[in-house]
Image: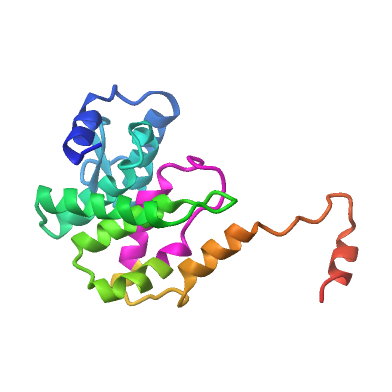
Amino acid sequence: MSVAALLAGFAALSPPEGSLAAWAARVGTPDGEFPLIGAGTRAETYVALQWNGERCASLGPAVGPTLVGLAVGAARRRSAAQLSAAVDAGLAAAAEVSTPTVPVSTGVLAATVCAARLAEVPEKELPALLDLAASLMVIGPPGVAPGHDPAAAWLAMRAWDAGITGMPGGLAHTLSVVAAGLPERAAADLDVVDLVEALP
């Protein structure tokens, strides 16, 4: 879905109801940094990205990159064409990641690549930024936290801008661990003392 079509989809959403409306009422403020789409209020960017991601998830995989792209692109005065190119780059990057046995939120990668393009992160630095973003990925069923992807990408960019780096090779390591499967959990009927004694 193109960014223009997605923006039209945002505009066509019915007003938020139920728990989503209550959430907007709790976090919304007229002077917030980023709009809560369709709620008539704004919120701090990180929270707004989570809320909007949850609200707009049904519109497809371009939601996360588009939302974080809007936040980063507006802050850096980028054009709509740059936003579209960045969203496309993010989706392409996420599509290149092989799907491991256990699902992982590659949407964080798509959104981070989008944000990085709009922030003009040098191409040679992108792997290090993705290593940082990998530490923010959700390992679990797809769609478990749809607002997480754009919010995590925004957080990765903020951390990157502050000079925080991830573990070198963090993305590859995360994906390899997930692809190999998660370790079996301890049986619920074991005594904690037995678990401690079994530690190497």
Q: In the rendered image of this protein, does residue 169 appear above or below residue 74? A: below
Q: Is residue 167 left or right of residue 5?
A: right
Residues in magenta? 132-158
Residue 63: x percent and y percent?
31, 41
Q: In the rendered image of this protein, does residue 161 appear above or below residue 143? A: below
Q: What residue do we see at 20% from left, 64% from top?
A: 119
Residue 70: x percent and y percent?
21, 49
Q: What residue do we see at 29% from left, 23% from top?
A: 15
Answer yes or no: is residue 3 visible. Answer: yes
Residue 169: x percent and y percent?
47, 74
Q: What residue do we see at 59% from left, 50% from top?
A: 102
Answer yes or no: is residue 44 visible. Answer: no
Quadrant position of residue 3:
top left
Quadrant position of residue 161:
bottom left
Task: Give yes or no for residue 154 being in the magenta stretch.
Answer: yes
Q: In which quadrant of the rendered image does the N terminus lie?
A: top left
Q: In the rendered image of this protein, does residue 138 appear above or below residue 132? A: above
Q: In which quadrant of the rendered image does the C terminus lie?
A: bottom right
Q: Is residue 197 left or right of residue 166?
A: right
Residue 83: x percent and y percent?
17, 51
